[in-house]
Amino acid sequence: VNEGKDTLSSEDLSELLAAGTKEVHEKAENTQFVKDFLKGRIRKELFKLGAVALYYTYTAMEEEIERNKDHPHFAPLYFPTELHRREALARDLEYFYGPDWQSEVSCSPAAQRYVDRIHEVGQEDPVLLVSHAYTRYMGDLSGGQVLKKVAQRAMKLPPTGEGLEFYTFDGIHSAKEFKQLYRSRMNVLVLDGDIKKRLVAEAVKAFQFNMEVFDELEEIGKTIQEDVLDAGM
Ligand code: HEM
């Protein structure tokens, strides 16, 4: 029984994660790739490569979530119909790369480092999977609708939503309410203060993996010629 003596263990995990990633969130928002994206400066070839990186990331994450869905440190956060993105990303990639998309795409070095960490966590330290799920799904539910509209306009994608299924959560009516539910579920996990600290550190790491993917895309962008880009648009 927590008698309130230990302030850290009595603090809500949702609050600790939000506070502990505030600084790295600001850093992520300020990477060149993300800033350009928000301004509608999105090049389709890079956007497609971003979707590829997300496909490998969510494939790894959702594989490890399935493995750990009954683990007491993850079970309350298991919402496959509402949250899981792998199939939506597969449809987006089919739209962008065609029916043979699977032979056209591969996992980039930065995405592979992220994927490797997710598998390591899922198999050796599954409690830390919470940090990875938090970083991606809560972020997707927060910024998704804005990013979807920006991308749709910038790349002149069809209003039907093709190519942007990743940003559409059909099973969630109110992102705000779902985020509240998800936070309350994080807060019922039985975790001592030491594990909470490790969870915050892992969430910071998850943000850093995402930033490495953005920086990699930024570097690739510098090597793609404008005429190729124009043709791709
Ligand atoms: C939350 C904006 C990038 C992960 C939020 C919220 C905003 C926001 C406004 C708060 C929403 C709310 O309180 O209801 C942005 C913008 C970004 C960006 C403008 C740049 C395009 C990212 C990235 C990640 C991320 C790159 C990680 C991959 C998160 C997470 C939350 C969040 C985990 C939930 C925070 C919490 O309530 O605990 N974001 N974000 N965001 N974002 Fe971002």
Image: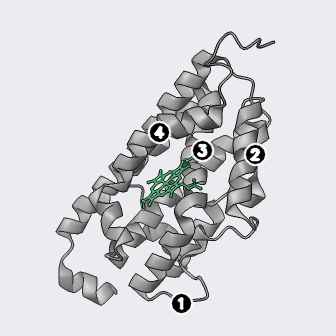
Q: Secondary structure at mark 1?
A: loop
Position of the N terminus by quadrant: top right
Tag 3–tag 2 contact (CB < 8 Å) = no
Give x and y (percent) for residue 22.
45, 41
Give x and y (percent) for residue 177.
74, 57
Crowd around label 1: few <14 · some 14–19 · many ≥20 (10 Å): few
Give the alpha-carbon distance from disc 4 to disc 3, as whole Å: 11 Å
Give the alpha-carbon distance from disc 2 to disc 4, as whole Å: 22 Å
Residue 110 - label = none
Q: Earlier in the sequence, mark 3 or mark 2?
A: 2
Position of the C terminus by quadrant: bottom left
The relative height of residue 33 versus residue 211 in the rendered view (above or below) is below
Viewer-side label of 1, 4 = 4
Q: Which residue is mark 1?
A: 158
Can residue 157 be seen here?
A: yes
The relative height of residue 230 versus residue 42 in the rendered view (above or below) is below
Crowd around label 4: few <14 · some 14–19 · many ≥20 (10 Å): many
Q: Earlier in the sequence, mark 2 or mark 1?
A: 2
Check disc 4 and give the amino acid type.
Answer: Thr
Q: Is mark 4 within 8 Å of ligand 1?
A: yes
Crowd around label 3: few <14 · some 14–19 · many ≥20 (10 Å): many
Tag 3–tag 1 contact (CB < 8 Å) = no
Check disc 1 and give the amino acid type.
Answer: Pro
Q: Which residue is mark 3?
A: 134
Residue 21 - label = 4
Give the alpha-carbon distance from disc 1 to disc 4, as whole Å: 35 Å
Check disc 3 and give the amino acid type.
Answer: Tyr
Instruction: Name which residue lies at 39% across and 66% down.
Output: 49
